[in-house]
Each structure stands twice: as structure tokens, then as C-alpha cells.
Image (spheres, helix red, strand yellow):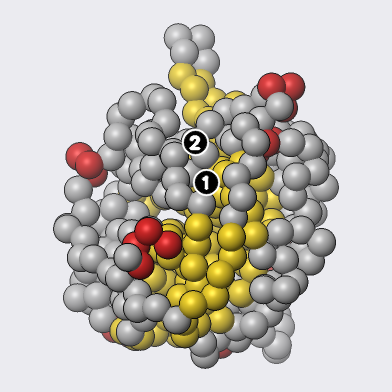
Amino acid sequence: MMKKSLYFLLALIPLLTGCGDKFDTNLLSTAKGPANSTGDTLYIAVNPAWEGFNNPQAMLMGHEPFLYVCDTDNDRIVMFDIAGNRLGELHIKKPIAITQDMRLNLIVCAEFDTVITGSSAATTYSAVYKIDLVSANHIIANAQLHRILPTDISNPHQKDLKYTGAVSFYDNSYYIARVGPNNTSITADPDNSLLQFVPIDFTHDSAYGRVHDIDPLSSGLISANGINCMGAFSKKNIDFVATLSGQSAFKAQWFHHYSTVASEGYQSEFDPKDGIAFVKPNKFVAPTGCCVDASGNIFVTDSDPSKDSVYKFSAYGDELQSFGGPLYFSKPTAVAFFDKTLYVLDAGKNKIFRFILSTDTQ
């Protein structure tokens, strides 16, 4: 499909917002095919941008819906309503990835410091936390942090492991992306892996181990080589989109889960031989953010200055729109979408930029 033109306009307009109902998993589609992916082609910037961050690395539109920002170098998660009102913040060291399950728990990749036996100085470890917002009545400042990973820091290798991405599914299971230097075997627990968790209750989870048969170093499709962001679909499945920072010709991928009588696992939704834009080799240079809207459209941010900054693909993998570059953005790191409004997080300018379809200004 020929790429549609996108006119990038700057205008001062009011942000039109709506109220969402209580989230119900019965609203998720069970259809195998994509939903309507035909969209408008004209976005208008909504002023003002939201400011006050320091090197923010991730952003999530929650199910409530509230917008959560990993304000990384300010060591906090900031919570907004969709009108831009700051509702609160939670201190957590260096948050870099965030997801939310259907119970409205946040799952965050961050860090913590601790002094280990035999050392006088603190050691910093990558960590995964679960945050129960419901018990705190959604007053995020009062929410408790429950550490999920690591479970054991006595292993010296633990300090070399980083948790870099998180995605949750309709059944409250979730995956955590892990990266590290030891990837000599695909079967012997390589550092570059996806870790699977199934919840026991609101704050406790059962680790199901690694998601199998995902190559830790592959430069091709279905790889765990440097996953830095993941986004789920609004369907009753465990498909997800990921962006990768490792050496790969395919730095954005759709992991499609299949199940047959003989086996189950993940395969690419698209074959590059079919000429699908989403899996065109070397399409992206430095993608760090992705999300999927309710229609199955995929948004990807690329922070490389030689590329457009924001890409939109249909549920069929066709490129619908792209815009940005250094004229508009400095270092776009994350993207979110809700109620026809596109949110782009820029870690270079420390702002959230918003865009709305022109048809919604009339």
C-alpha cells in the first residue's frame, strides 16, 4: 500500500476528552483478523506540551484511563489524567518500562540499591516491581512497591542483568524482557530472554520461567536481542509488538502466538518476502517505544535523527503515516494513544507532545 501523506500542523486547540467506563475484559475482541484500520491522515499538535520531566524513558496509557510516565532521572512515576492534570507521583529509582494488568496493577522495571555481605558500598541492581493501585485507592503516592525480581542477589552475575521491558495480557499474565552478556546457549537460560509470570493474587506472582524458543542473539525475527519495549493487543490473545536495540535488521517485530496439536510458540505475524512495510529490513534504526490502539494499528517511535520519529502501521503491517524527525523532536522514547489522541514522549526535550485528528476539531 502506498504510504499516505501526513500533514503536520501546529495549532492551539482545546483537547477533547471523554470518560471511559470501568475496564471489562469481555470488551476485548476474540476475532483472529484485524479490526478496522482505516484512519484519518491529518494530525494537529495540541498545545501546550506537558513538561517537568528529566530524561523520561517510558509512558503508558492505563486502562482507567490514566497516563503514567517513567520520569527516569527524577526517580519517579508520574500519573496524569487525560486532561493533563497531574494526579500524583511515586518515588522509584530509574524507572524505564511500565505496563498495567487488568486488575490495574502497575508492573515497572526500575532499580534499587543495597549493600551486600562483604561490601561496604551499595550495589545497584535492576528490578521489577508490582504496584497495587486499587489498595491505595489510586492515590499513587500511597501505593506500596512489591519487588518481583530479582528474587536472589547472592549470585554475582545478577548485577549484570537488566530488566528492560514489560507487557501484560488479558488474563493478567505478563512478560518481562531481560538482557545481559551471557547468551552462549538458547536452551541454558540465556540472559537475553522473556520471563513469564502468572499472578497468584494482587501482589504475588508465580514465575513460569523463560518463554521458550526465542533466540537470544538473532538478528532476524522472533529474537530477544535487546528488547526495550513491548505492547499488547486489545484481544484475548498473547500476541505483542516489541522494539529492539540489539544488532538486528528487524528492530520492530510482531510476536504472534500460535498453538497446534504438535506445538506452540511464537512466530512473526509477517513475512518480509511479502513486502510488508512493518518488517522491511532496516526500517528502523533506534526504536524505543511502541503501542497498539484499539483498532490494531501499531505506533512506533524511532529516536534516530536520520529517520521520522513516529510511525503508524495498520493491523496488516502497511505503513499509514510517519512524521517528525529532528525538526520536531529531539529524542522520542515512547508513544501512547487514547480517544483519537496521540501522545509522544520526548526525552531530549523532556516533554509530552500531543496530536489529535483534524476531524475532531470541527
| Residue labelled with disc 2 | 315
Q: Looking at the picture, which amino acid does disc 1 mark?
A: Ile
Q: Position of residue 234 (x, y in %)?
A: 36, 43
Dots 1, 2 in contact, CB < 8 A: yes
In the orientation shown, which residue stands out farthest toward the front?
A: 362
Residue 75 position (above or below residue 177): below
Secondary structure under the numbered disc 1 in the rendered image: strand
* Residue occupying image coordinates x 42% and y 72%: 68
329 sits left or right of 42 in the view: right
Q: Position of residue 30 (x, y in %)?
A: 30, 29
Residue 49 position (above or below residue 57): below
* Residue occupying image coordinates x 80% and y 43%: 282
Q: Quadrant of the N terminus?
A: top right
| Residue labelled with disc 1 | 298
Can residue 215 be seen? no
Q: Residues within 10 Å of mark 1 (few under 14, many from 20)?
A: many
Using the image as rendered, state which of residue 148 and residue 262 is in the foreground: 262
Q: Position of residue 117 (x, y in %)?
A: 65, 78
- Residue 138 in which image quadrant: bottom left
* Residue occupying image coordinates x 21% and y 61%: 20
